[in-house]
Image (spheres, rainbow, N blue to C red):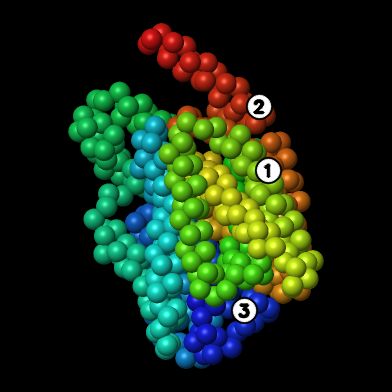
Amino acid sequence: MTAINAMPYYQSKFNSGYLGSSTGIIFSIYTIGGVVGPWFAGPLSDRFGRRGGMFAGALMICVGTAVIASANKRGQFIAGRFVLGFGVSILTTAAPSYCVEICPPQWRGRMTGFYNCGWFGGSIPAAGITLGTAKMKSDLSWRLPLIFQAFPSLVVILAVWFLPESPRWLMANGRDEDALNFLARFHGGGNRNDPVVQLEWAEFKEGIALDGSDKRWWDYSELFNSGSARYRSLQVLLMGVFGQFSGNGLGYFNTEIYRAVGYGDDMVFNLNLANSFTSAFGAGWGVALADRMPRRKVLVAGTFASAVMLAGNGGLSARWAATPEDSKNLNVGRGSVAFFFLFNIVYSFTYTPLQALYPVECLQTTTRAKGMAMYAFVVGAISFINLFAGPIALDNIKHNYIFIFVGWDIVESILWYLLGVETVGRTLEELEEIFGSPSPVATSKAIYDEHKKIRAAAAAAAK
């Protein structure tokens, strides 16, 4: 939508404007669907399995795509955006739960983090497609990109039933033999007696309840009925808010940010594509290190670095705006854009791998789908603020809107330091030792430091 909103034929059809409340409604109605959808997503994924949730979400996305791509009236386009948001919230509840539940412990960070990098698998082609279709002199300039966005969901619809179901979901639903067969085939090379398989199986039997709240579609009490559950849910809520409100919402309007510092239409689309590539680089780098880097330290340092980059972007944007038209220095505008690119790289390195990984690994198996539904609800609510208030704020207070996120990111960094739990290097079941302790933060830090010393000693002995 970022690039489509800048297309003249789209503007001519719907007259939404580049910024302001009309644009805010079209952008933010997607998040209203994302707020409603999670209440169906959790029960769907618990009742019909993680694959069933992915299938239902992908089907809704295809329906929403058909509605917006064929729209001739603004109301139809808005309705389609709602359906899209509804479907995405279901898919993004089921898919990360599936990823984290099928991964061997030593691959969990990279595999689940890589899942969330799929966003760039859509944003980069989307930026490239819109760069090409922007030159078309018809409504196809904006309709074609919208049609192409259904392709990944169509692949999910056709392929998902050929995937094995999550072993943790299977065991939670009384299908122990199927769960053990999965572990033996995919984690033990076909050997049921493999030590890794036996360890995981023992942890499954100890940690997965057959009578959990996942069997009751209406019951969300296990997310808050104990100190451990409440601290787990706190981590989910922190990532839901901070992952969406660290300045990344500015990216929905980056074409207007580039225009504000002197770039023309053609260069705006080129920068939009380039930003997708550089952000993907940052995310990929984060994924590659996800199983080695301490989550907590990355979140503290990365969020603070995001504040620094946004301060550079906002400061140079303010200088550009204060300079008379006949005296503007192009290097100031270029510097502003460079800081914006650096912000997106830092943000993508810090948050893109962890947005999917951190919440799902903090949740127990029987609360994972509903916990991720809660996460999707929070993401939708914060995204609504970004998408509705963002264009209004940029229209009214211009670059000063950026400084709100500078201050907020500093607050986030402090809160991650005080409240963030270290989860790297532990199996999903072993995390109960951390969350069940009187001080989860201190316990997680002590366990991480202990494991770090053990690995260092082992490495020294190997030499």
Marked residue nearer the N-terminal end (3 or 1)? 3
Q: Amino acid at mark 2?
A: Ala
Q: Residues within 10 Å of mark 1 (few under 14, many from 20)?
A: many
**How far is the residue under mark 1 from the one under mark 2?**
21 Å
Question: Which SS class for mark 2?
Answer: helix
The image position of residue 162, as x and y in percent, is 24, 55
**Looking at the image, is mark 3 or mark 2 earlier in the sequence?**
3
- Percent position of residue 106, x then y: 39, 32
Q: Which residue is mark 1?
A: 304
Q: Nearer the viewer, residue 224 or 83?
A: 83
Q: Residue at x 42, y 89 (%)?
A: 138
* Residue ID for mark 2: 442
**Disc 2: CA contacts within 10 A as few (<14), some (14-19) or many (>=20):** some
Q: Is residue 360 above or below residue 379?
A: above
Q: Pointer 3: residues within 10 angstroms few (<14), some, or many (20+)?
A: some
User: Which residue is under mark 3?
Assistant: 18
Mark 3 or 2, closer to the camera: 3
Q: Are marks 1 and 2 in contact (CB under 8 Å)?
A: no
Residue 44 can be seen, yes or no: no
Q: CA distance from mark 3 to mark 1?
A: 31 Å
Alpha-carbon span between mark 3 and mark 2: 48 Å
Instruction: Where is residue 254? Give x, y as percent.
Output: 59, 66
Say if mark 3 contacts mark 2, CB within 8 Å.
no
The outermost residue toward the left is: 190
Kindly identify the residue that appears in the image at 25 percent across and 34 percent down.
Answer: 184
What SS does tag 1 mark? helix
